[in-house]
Image: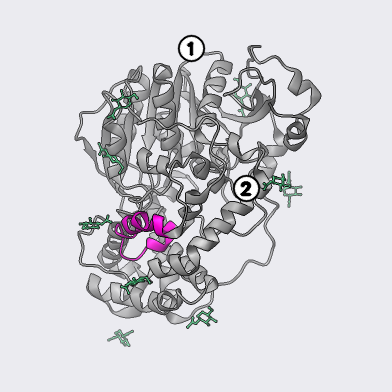
Amino acid sequence: MIGSEIAAVLGLTAAATALPQQQKQTLQWKPCPELNEQIANLSDPFPITKFDCAKLQVPLDYSCPKSSELLELDLFRINATKEPVLGSILYNPGGPGGTAAENLPLNAPDLHLNIGGQYNLISWDPRGTGNTLPFNCGVADAAGSSNVARRDTDLSLASANTTEIFLNFGWDQAVAYADACFATNNKTGQFIGTGSTAHDMISIVDALGEDGLLRYYGWSYGTALGDYFAAMFPDRVERMVLDANVNPHTYQQGHRSEFLEDTDKAFAAFIAECLANADACPLVAATNATTPTELFAVFNALISPLAENATSSPEAFNAYVGAIAVPYQQLYYPANWPSLAQTLTDTLLGVVPDTPTTPPPPPYNLGTDSLNGIRCSDATLQVPDATSYLPTLSSQLNSTTGFGPIYSALWPCASWRMPDKLQYTGNFTAKTRHPILFVNGEFDVATPISGAYNASAGFEGSVVLAHNGYGHGIIPSPSRCVAEKIQAYFVEGALPEEGTRCEPDFGPWELRAFYEESGLVRPF
Ligand SMILES: *[C@@H]1O[C@H](CO)[C@@H](O)[C@H](O)[C@H]1NC(C)=O
Ligand SMILES: *[C@@H]1O[C@H](CO)[C@@H](O)[C@H](O)[C@H]1NC(C)=O
Ligand SMILES: *[C@@H]1O[C@H](CO)[C@@H](O)[C@H](O)[C@H]1NC(C)=O
Ligand SMILES: *[C@@H]1O[C@H](CO)[C@@H](O)[C@H](O)[C@H]1NC(C)=O
Ligand SMILES: *[C@@H]1O[C@H](CO)[C@@H](O)[C@H](O)[C@H]1NC(C)=O
Ligand SMILES: *[C@@H]1O[C@H](CO)[C@@H](O)[C@H](O)[C@H]1NC(C)=O
Ligand SMILES: *[C@@H]1O[C@H](CO)[C@@H](O)[C@H](O)[C@H]1NC(C)=O
Ligand SMILES: *[C@@H]1O[C@H](CO)[C@@H](O)[C@H](O)[C@H]1NC(C)=O
Ligand SMILES: *[C@@H]1O[C@H](CO)[C@@H](O)[C@H](O)[C@H]1NC(C)=O
């Protein structure tokens, strides 16, 4: 069903395409010093954990059993740190579009810390990323170049009229971007979605040569991948921890209309923590603010001119999205909150930051558009025109006062033309072999805890463990309580009682000292 043309596109060798599909493969792990060095260079100044490499050939198109076209996956392994070794845990680093090579070697110490060190950590560059069908549209991103609360506070952040932006040029830009991606990827774009990747996970589990069951830790988008896998292959789930959860239903539709639901709340927490650490938070000295209302007013004064101008042109809109993306992204990591306060102070005082003079090393991930390539090929909601999307837009904008324009990154999915061949369209209900453990922070800027409860409702016996800490996922806000529960789950299969809530060990202004004392140099 796919000619030799695609083999050329994929860079497949004759030998690779000739391998019979049924042949059982076992992973051959090898040292890969050159790639270790390349990743170390890219991660500098943050140290990486040494890893081994393997390759695995999988069917390009699982929906077509007769096809012998193959695809090569790049796999990476970081060894357990403690005996006895209990097996392997697969890890997906989120995005979608994140590569294992860039993320696993940086995150391994934190994963070991939470999981307990007795498992080998295995990850792979998902289809669309790295060197595996890299998805690249050859154009700048659509509306907003950013890749990137429950309204229980009295805060109201300055905002642009995003509906007007959407109708003036946002929708047209999104359509043009989707068209450009189709024009450049129409042969391969239907093989990189999450349904296909879930099948790859089966191939990987089989090739590990263990018990044929999945042990998995998924973060952020990796939770969607976990939900898809669990719904498609419930009998293969031996252990699954899903951390920082997307709502699988709105992810599947492609608009994620609630994903910024806790973002205002997280921003309010940043303001409150700054005031609580007034001596160490430079914003306080620079403004003499003593109340949250005063600090919000300071932030709004910075952002308002950009917001007011944002309707005037795509460039002005991009400048505005870029400005709100600064706090949005720093809110992922409470250890960065002091430097976010410094950045806002510098902006207020007109201090221009130094720009780096040495150019960065060439990128590892060749899939520059893999984020959209993957999530949009999963998306089931496509509409014919801007007007038809307005109810969806309104539910997106309803979830946040000031961060709504970040939703613009999802608009192209509504006119996507390359659905995943194995697109999963089910309702995420299943009885898994062993119940899933969901964990979620209560101030998560990108994945509100409602997503965890929503997903958990579909999977029998699953439990949500709430973490009363800041940041995107549990890793940026260490908690011995969370780590104990995750270790008990992986090792003994024990699930905490529904309703269990853990406290973080440190506040945002204490984290640097903790990382320095514990010798963990973190990539944030
Ligand atoms: C890593 O960086 C060093 C110093 O810039 C350079 O000499 C070396 O070639 C780089 N290695 C790789 C694999 O990119
Ligand atoms: C991981 O463990 C295997 C088997 O014990 C060993 O051969 C390999 O060198 C280790 N890899 C690294 C990067 O330490
Ligand atoms: C925003 O723009 C839309 C479309 O132009 C318009 O209908 C709406 O009244 C505007 N909202 C506000 C608050 O100005
Ligand atoms: C499909 O992609 C090829 C390049 O891979 C391009 O030349 C062609 O125009 C595309 N077809 C459509 C209908 O966009
Ligand atoms: C903050 O208060 C100090 C001391 O009263 C004063 O010197 C300074 O000008 C004030 N700064 C601002 C931005 O109001
Ligand atoms: C508003 O945006 C336009 C580009 O559309 C730019 O030329 C102008 O400088 C911006 N004005 C402000 C006040 O940022
Ligand atoms: C927006 O939020 C309000 C209040 O929470 C709710 O009543 C309304 O239905 C929401 N609108 C949409 C389109 O989601
Ligand atoms: C989900 O789908 C399954 C199979 O299609 C069906 O039996 C079940 O009733 C659905 N559950 C819900 C809550 O819609
Ligand atoms: C999960 O979210 C979807 C989409 O918002 C919604 O339709 C569904 O009712 C939710 N399910 C639960 C159990 O909350």
SS type, badge 1 = loop
Q: Nearer the viewer, mark 2 or mark 1?
A: 2
Residue tagged 1:
211
Sequence-first disc among 2 and 1: 2
Q: Is residue 467 left or right of residue 53?
A: left
Which stretch appears magenta?
A: 387-407
Residue nearest the viewer, comparing 187 with 407: 187
Measure the alpha-carbon separation of dots 2 and 1.
40 Å
Tell me residue 330's x, y (percent). 43, 58
In the picture of the structure, the residue carrying the numbered disc 2 is 182
Picture colour scheme: one colour
Residue at the location (61% across, 29% down)?
A: 75
Q: Indicate if the residue with disc 2 has its beta carbon within 8 Å of ligand 4.
A: yes
Secondary structure that dominates the magenta span: helix
Which label number is shown at residue 135? none
Look at the image and say whether residue 393 sits in the magenta stretch.
yes
